[in-house]
Amino acid sequence: MAHHRSAGWLALAAFVAASVLVGCDPPATTSSPSSSASSAVAASTPTPSITQTSSAGEAVAAGDAEAVRQLLNTLPVKGRAPKTGYERSEFGTAWKDVDHNGCDTRNDILARDLTDKVYKPGTHDCVVASGVLHDPYTGTTIHFTRGQNTSTAVQIDHIVALSDAWQKGAQQLSGDLRTQLANDPLNLLAVDGPTNQQKSDGDAATWLPPNKAFRCTYVTHQVQVKAKYSLWVTQAEKAAITNQLGTCS
């Protein structure tokens, strides 16, 4: 069926699953990229005109914290630019169907990250009506039900917050690349709504997931996203990520 998710999404789901299973303190952590020129991340989401600096998929699967550290060291270190001009609309319409599979990005990520999914009838298995989230940020289990008063229990987080990206290089990206960044599965996770609200637009220097077992995976994805989209880090942010990587296996 034309509206069903493509093989690329299946490959991405396998990639994300691998990243959750490898890593840090307790069992569910990750690590990633090496500083080489071609990127497995790019293969999952084609990125025209972006400098590729990591073979991220292989490194995540290997749980290679040193590779992530090397990639982190390729990122420029600068101060945070002014937030002047930032609007959500600068990153395109929220939850566009950028991969043209007939489903918007929010529902694509819900379908990837939830288990026991039930789809709304008549939506060609696009709109997730209910499911179960094993929340990576808190380590809790959340039963999701779509509805006006219930949908916010599960939110889709930008691992690198869009406001943070704007202040660290995204102002210089084209509109098309900003739209891609906002909808890139590498930068998106279904998570506990209240915890996502607490994070707001914080970077690693100001916020890390309460679930310590997921922190290596979290900072790994931040480094990957910033490398993929030529963004920078602050000195405090780099120090926080470096400290976290020191706890990863």
Image (spheres, helix red, strand yellow):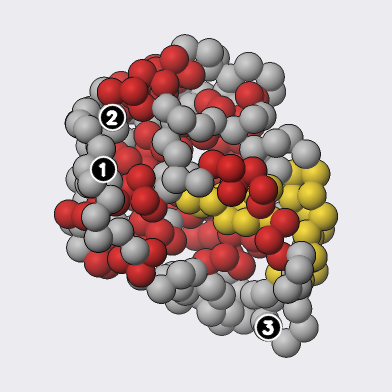
- Does 91 sit left or right of 159 as displayed? left
**Quarter of the C terminus within the rendering:** top right
Q: Which residue is mark 2?
A: 234
Going from N to C along the chain, the mark reached first, 1 or 3, is: 3
Pointer 2 with pointer 3, Cβ within 8 A: no
Going from N to C along the chain, the mark reached first, 2 or 3, is: 3
Picture layout, residue 1 above or below residue 9: below
Between 159 and 105, the one lying in front of the other is 159
- Does 51 sit left or right of 196 as displayed? left
In the image, residue 87 lies at what x, y percent? 34, 63
Tell me the crowding category of disc 1: few under 14, some 14 to 19, or many 20 or more residues within 10 angstroms, Cα based.
many
Q: Which residue is mark 1?
A: 168
Residue 123, numbered label: 3
Tag 1: amino acid: Lys
Q: What whole-number distance in Å separates the C-alpha atoms at marks 2 and 1?
A: 8 Å
Pointer 2 with pointer 1, Cβ within 8 A: yes
Task: Give residue 58's quadrant in the image.
Answer: top left
